[in-house]
Image: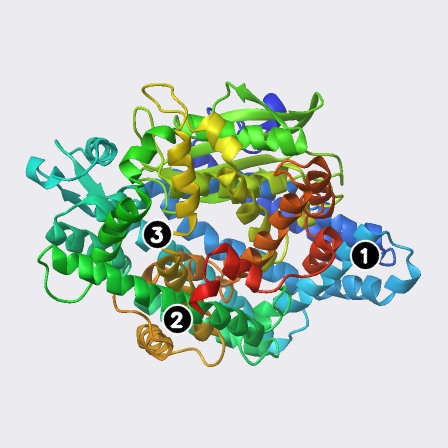
Amino acid sequence: MTNPLLADWDTPFGIAPFDRIQDDHFAPALEAALAEHRREIETIAANPEPASFANTIEALEAAGRTLDRVLGVFFTVAGADSTPEREALQREFSPRLAAHFSDISANRALFARIQAVWEAREALALTDEQARLLTLTHRGFVRAGAALEGEAEARMKAIKSRLAELGTAFAQNLLADERGWFMELDEADLEGLPDFVIDAARAAGREKGVDGPVITLARSLIVPFLQFSPRRDLRERAWRAWAARGANGGETDNRAIAAEILKLREERARLLGHDSFAAWKLETEMARTPDRVRDLLMAVWAPARARAEADAEVLAAMMREDGVNGPLEPWDWRYYAEKRRRAEHDLDEAALKPYLQLDRMIEAAFACANRLFGLEFRPLDIPLYHEDCRAWEVTRNGRHVAVFIGDWFARGSKRSGAWCSAMRSQAKFPEPQTPVVINVCNFAKGTPTLLSYDDARTLFHEFGHALHQMLSDVAYESMSGTSVARDFVELPSQLFEHWLEVPEVLEEFAIHYETGAAMPRAMLDKVLRAANFDQGFQTVEYVASALVDLAFHDGPAPADPMAKQAEVLAAIGMPNAIGMRHATPHFAHVFAGDGYSSGYYSYMWSEVMDADAFEAFKAAGSAFDPDAAAALEEHILSKGGSREAEELYVAFRGRMPGVDALLKGRGLLQAG
């Protein structure tokens, strides 16, 4: 029978035919797609005609369509619905793909043609987008090692292959640790837990095949447990398991893998003529240099730590009032912070969650997209890769814009965290294509599913990424949507979070799941007043992780990453009662691939801009000001990577912002 991954997809909007795709289709489909891509590359490289923009640069852009399609499906299901078979395929595919793309970047005849077009660029009368594509193509080949020769070329290929293997192993080890641990609770252990936590724990128990409630390492379950359980012994047990992911010894331990990854990254950068991996990686980002990243992080660190230390004294006093002696520990912070929030803001997460139904928050995100950009969402009844997934057709003025897929529930087969990806990105060349965009989250499933305020913010964050994909309007797929500098990609997502805090949005969509009543205005006011509650803690745990990431890559690779992590935390005065948001053995952003390596700071770099960008709407007098929305779409959301990120932001706001906008947004200015 025909492999459905290689056949024409006669499906609505060209969606992958998930109901026909089996795991045993992936390997032969990859084999065929790689062979086709090699033929396409060889045809370009061996073209007897003089190199031109069309027969070299655009030909490269058009090549590999089948490979993109196969990988788009495979990596979607491998990340969101893993199986032992898919994990084995991923271990097999990763080094093969690394070798394939290394061969392309090392193809001398191909690079000679790219170089010829590059050298003739001034005489080619290229459009702005064509010139940008040429720049990105040439730069990408040079940074991949196309100019290397002999032993250096061979070594670069070996490094890339090994890094692909190690990144896959790191991610799978982390998933195994998260999937394998759970803590059974008896009825007495449920004391003090609100109903939504108990319901989620019982649902998790059913998934694990346990007759009773369990706490797993899914963030949407373990965090509320740490917030609400009065059982300090159980909180400590859960927190230690959460903190120990990837560092439990045995086959799933990630510490040696992290050390090898860092060593290979340093060697890779030095082969390309850079002093450090951070110097190489940041060269194409907005930050440009490690020093600029460090300056930003340290400008935020001092006021954040001051706030956190002041908060720690308050929480420790509360703990002593409970008769608990000894220092405040990481497994105590969320519990006492929640008690403090209830006392100071009269805001109880358990009372808030019934108003934050998942379905209503999805409607809220859609409604904001409609008011801002005119997008409309129509449910689709199509086969998807898991029964939990839902799909919508996205239109504007009756014209098809995109397909949006939401996969929101935690399960053992899904890696942790939340992300947005595109199975197909927007493009006009070689023919028009619309995007297929997926948001993946890990919310605890319920009947109905109720979100924390942080969960709701995550939903809006990922949908902001989705809007960046949906509203893309560029010629070339390689620069569409979220194909931008890493420290710019979080701007649209973090900016969209602000609409969750717009009172009229919460008034309309924060509806009690039992009574149907809107969130009382008094509660809404408390939610908004408490928006910056515990920002010292949240900022410290994030900045510490970003500083450790930077230290790993800015200079010689540490032989012992755990010792280096401890050294960095000691040097900055990390509060004892706060753990890093992502400690080294489970820092998937940095070690499961190169995406955020030397780049975890990106969220904060983007936050400097998003805090300032929302001011454009405030200055206009409405969060839904049509002119501000049109400018945001025109200058940022539609442009992808077709221009340098700083140019796009300045086109939108007229200048770059300073760090004060971020400190003000987090309520940290007075702590400095």
| Residue at mark 3 to residue at mark 2: CA–CA distance | 16 Å
Label 3 neighbour load within 10 Å: few <14, some 14-19, many 20+: many
Which type of secondary structure does the marked residue at label 3 adopt? helix
Q: Horizontally, is 2 left or right of 354 in the view? A: right
Q: Is residue 349 above or below residue 569?
A: above
Q: Which residue is mark 1?
A: 131
Residue 307's x, y, as percent? 37, 64
- Amino acid found under the numbered disc labelled 3: Gln
Label 2 environment density (alpha carbons within 10 Å; few <14, some 14–19, many ≥20): some
Helix, strand or loop status at disc 1: helix
Name the residue rendered at 84%, 58% in the picture: 51
Q: How many marks?
A: 3
**Residue 414 shows in this picture:** yes
**Disc 3 vs disc 2: Cβ atoms closer than 8 Å?**
no
- Up/down of 558 relative to 576, above or below: below
Q: Residue 63 location in percent, x, y?
A: 69, 46
Residue ID at (30%, 39%): 349
Crowding near the residue tagged with mark 1, few <14, some 14–19, many ≥20 C-alpha atoms within 10 Å: some
Q: Which mark is first along the chain, 3 or 1? A: 1
Mark 2 and mark 1: span between their CA atoms? 38 Å
Residue corresponding to mark 2: 260
Residue pointed to by mark 3: 172
